[in-house]
Image (cartoon, helix red, strand yellow):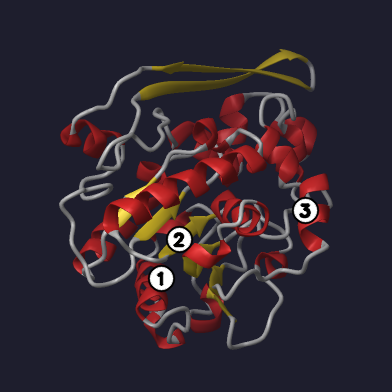
Amino acid sequence: MSTSDLRRTLTAWAVAVPLLALLVAGCTTTGQAGSGSSISDTSSSTAVAVSTAAANTVTSTVATTAATGSPSASAAATALLPGVNDPSCMSTDRPVVLLHGTFSSVRADFSVMVPALLAAGRCVYGIEYGDGGVAAVRQSAAEVTAFIDQVLAQTGAEQVDVIGFSQGGLVLRTALRLTGLAPRVAVGVLIAPSFHGSTSPLLTAVPAAVCPACADQVAGSALLTELAAGGDLDGSVRYAVVSSANDTVVTPVAAQVPQGPADRVSSIRVQDSCPTEQVDHVSLRANPGVVAWVVNALETGGSPDPATLTCG
């Protein structure tokens, strides 16, 4: 489908491409870390509508209405997922922080992942950054850094592990490099990350004024050029990346993987273990084999066993 066709209607976008499917099925709430002794969300509602105002012209309205105050634990669980940001959670393992993708939310991207993490004995935290992942990546990286600092203060841990889906991988990269987060992150497990951006026309089909994060994720953007000047790795973070050969959102697929030595970077494509598996960008996040591999990546400190990525 051409870029001009993508611009015709929201329905055509959502059906034809995984990125816009995220817009339709993704978040209806945005949040941030609450104050006090526990991590909480600030309830809000975000509506993102994309319509055609003229032939081949996309006009969009992003309306965000934020409510003040600190919601109860049950309200936070409703906004995110049960078990996420639970101040009563105790674990001897590092806290796990979830970073969602563009036009999305913790609930949309990690509803399958969270129960597996909780079953593995991890305490799980999530932030709905960047107004549903559309704000500039630098802004989102600052929000994520502040949230992780609060998680560390609450839990008493020295470091966290991070799971980032799609844009979440670039937000992590930006925070590690530009906000000084690197010493506080041990492992980054990245699912189809836009680590080096993407050449997909989907990103340029959305006006930068509507989605600054989309412009930041275009291969060769000013942000990516700045990040590239310092190489791909930061601190002593170990990176584990899972991708799919069927991904048409973050392209080329090989660009999803940070460049670095094998003791710092491990990667796998689903088709390496399951040659006939048809899994796209969006379905990666809930694929059972991918979920098991991600859990193993955390358990091994960033050196997952390829055999844990089983076929469906």
Q: Amino acid at mark 2?
A: Ile
Counting from the top left corner in percent of width and height, residue 240 is at 53, 74
User: In the orientation shown, which residue stands out farthest toward the top?
Assistant: 53
Say how many tags the image has: 3
Among the 4 quarters of the image, the one containing residue 311: bottom left
**Callout 3: helix, strand or loop?**
helix
Q: How many residues crowd mark 3 within 10 Å: few (<14), some (14–19), many (20+)? A: some
Q: CA distance from mark 3 to mark 2?
A: 20 Å
Q: Are marks 2 and 1 in contact (CB under 8 Å)?
A: yes
Counting from the top left corner in percent of width and height, residue 141 is at 58, 46
Q: Amino acid at mark 1?
A: Val
Q: Is residue 119 left or right of residue 106?
A: left
Q: Is residue 39 left or right of residue 192?
A: left
Q: Mark 2 or 1 closer to N-term?
A: 2
Mark 2 lies on residue = 163
Residue positioned 71% across, 47% down in the render: 217
Q: Is residue 42 above or below residue 118?
A: above
Question: Quarter of the image containing the N terminus?
Answer: top right
Q: Are marks 3 and 2 in contact (CB under 8 Å)?
A: no
Mark 3 lies on residue = 224
Residue positioned 67% across, 58% down in the render: 177
Residue positioned 69% across, 33% down in the render: 212
Does the image show residue 112? Answer: no
Mark 1 lies on residue = 294
The disc label shown at residue 307, or none: none
| Nearer to the camera, 300 or 292 | 300
Q: Amino acid at mark 3?
A: Leu
Q: Mark 3 or 2 closer to N-term?
A: 2
Among the 4 quarters of the image, the one containing residue 135: top right
**Callout 2: helix, strand or loop?**
strand
